[in-house]
Amino acid sequence: METIQSYHDLCKEIDIFEIRINDLEREYKFWYHACFSSSRKVSVPLNVCLDRMEVICDQVEAYSTILEEKEKTRKSIEERMNEFDGLEYKVRYMRDVEGKTLAEIAADLGYSYDWIKRISSRTKSTPRVHRAVAKDVLR
């Protein structure tokens, strides 16, 4: 099922854009303080600071636009994947996209845990993308 892999690749791209935007925002703060702080530790000409800040703003704007489109695509894919028929699709979606345990899936779908475990073992598991983990990298 390449659909799930494509979805996970898209989620990774979204995480990368979020990380990059956060990095640029931190760099912007650095340049802002370098320009306007009364205790300037770095001697940088004002025009250099302002030029870099302008480039950063342009990049954040561009990446934010791309991120917004990728989020729309992610949501659209999730909606379509949720419409798949068949128990195997539903189990894989709930396991890989929603991050539910097999016990939770069994309870939600009204099947025994053993049956859901058997169905789940038929499909290859794809690692779930955790945005919280990616955001921890920034700290």
Image (spheres, helix red, strand yellow):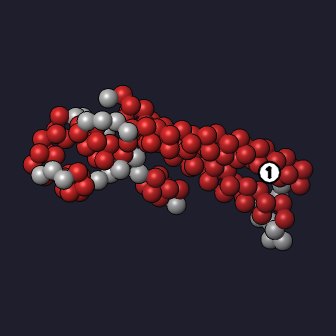
Residue 7 in view of the camera:
yes
Compared with residue 9, is residue 38 higher up or lower down, i.e. above or below?
below
Compared with residue 10, is residue 97 higher up or lower down, i.e. above or below?
below
Disc 1 marks which amino acid? Met
Compared with residue 114, is residue 122 higher up or lower down, i.e. above or below?
above
Q: Residue 34's spot in the image, x, y percent?
A: 79, 60
* Residue sitting farthest toward the top: 2
Q: Residue 3's spot in the image, x, y percent?
A: 38, 31
Q: Is residue 44 left or right of residue 129?
A: right
Q: Quadrant of residue 65?
A: top right
**Foreground pick, 40 / 58:** 58
**Foreground pick, 123 / 18:** 123
Which residue occupies 25% across, 43% down?
A: 91
Q: Residue 137's spot in the image, x, y percent?
A: 48, 54
Residue 125 in view of the camera:
no
Q: Residue 108's spot in the image, x, y percent?
A: 25, 55
Residue under circle 1? 53
Q: Secondary structure at mark 1?
A: helix
Which residue occupies 29% across, 53% down?
A: 100
Label 1: few (<14), some (14–19) or many (≥20) C-alpha neighbours in 10 Å? many
Which residue occupies 73% across, 46% down?
A: 61
